[in-house]
């Protein structure tokens, strides 16, 4: 993880969900760090292979596909900004 990635994580700390937050050691292995780490449309899963090796995977509800599986990383996404804004509006709506 680069210094730029570390700054990104600090800036977007409030948007990081519990699955990713609880797997900081796996985050440090990501290169480059995907913007999905702090996106409201991302659904993160911690998975294990048959040998018990843990990894993180991300499914995007906007793109409807796996956006991070240890092989490729999304570094820019138009839908991310919209998803974060919708999330902010939803959390401000009473009810």
Image (cartoon, rainbow, N blue to C red):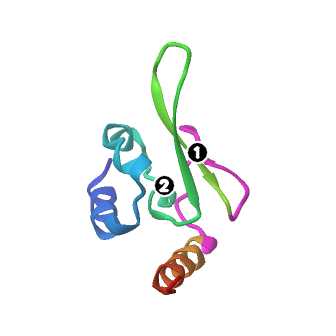
Q: Which residues are magenta?
A: 62-79
Give residue 83's quadrant in the image.
Answer: bottom right
Kindly identify which numbered label has been placed on residue 34: 2
On screen, residue 9 versus residue 55, left or right, reads: left
Q: Position of residue 95 (x, y in %)?
A: 53, 82
Residue ID for mark 1: 72
Numbered disc 1: secondary structure:
loop
**Sequence-wise first label, 1 or 2:** 2
The image shows residue 67, relative to residue 86, as above or below, that is above
Q: Secondary structure at mark 2?
A: loop
Q: Nearer the viewer, residue 48 or 95?
A: 95
Residue at (45%, 56%) from the top-left corner?
37
Q: Is residue 57 left or right of residue 25?
A: right
Residue at the image position 34 percent from the left and 68 percent from the top: 14
Q: Residue 84, how many percent across, how many down? A: 51, 75
Question: Residue shown at 32%/64% (left/top)?
Answer: 13
């Amino acid at each position: 993880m680069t210094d730029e990635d570390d700054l990104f994580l600090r800036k977007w700390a409030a948007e990081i969900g519990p699955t990713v937050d609880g797997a900081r050691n796996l985050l440090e292995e990501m290169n480059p760090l995907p913007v999905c780490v702090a996106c409201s449309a991302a659904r993160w899963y911690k998975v294990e292979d048959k040998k018990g090796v843990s990894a993180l995977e991300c499914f995007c509800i906007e793109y409807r596909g796996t956006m991070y599986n240890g092989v490729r990383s999304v570094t820019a996404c138009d839908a991310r900004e919209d998803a974060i804004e919708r999330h902010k509006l939803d959390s401000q709506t009473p009810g």
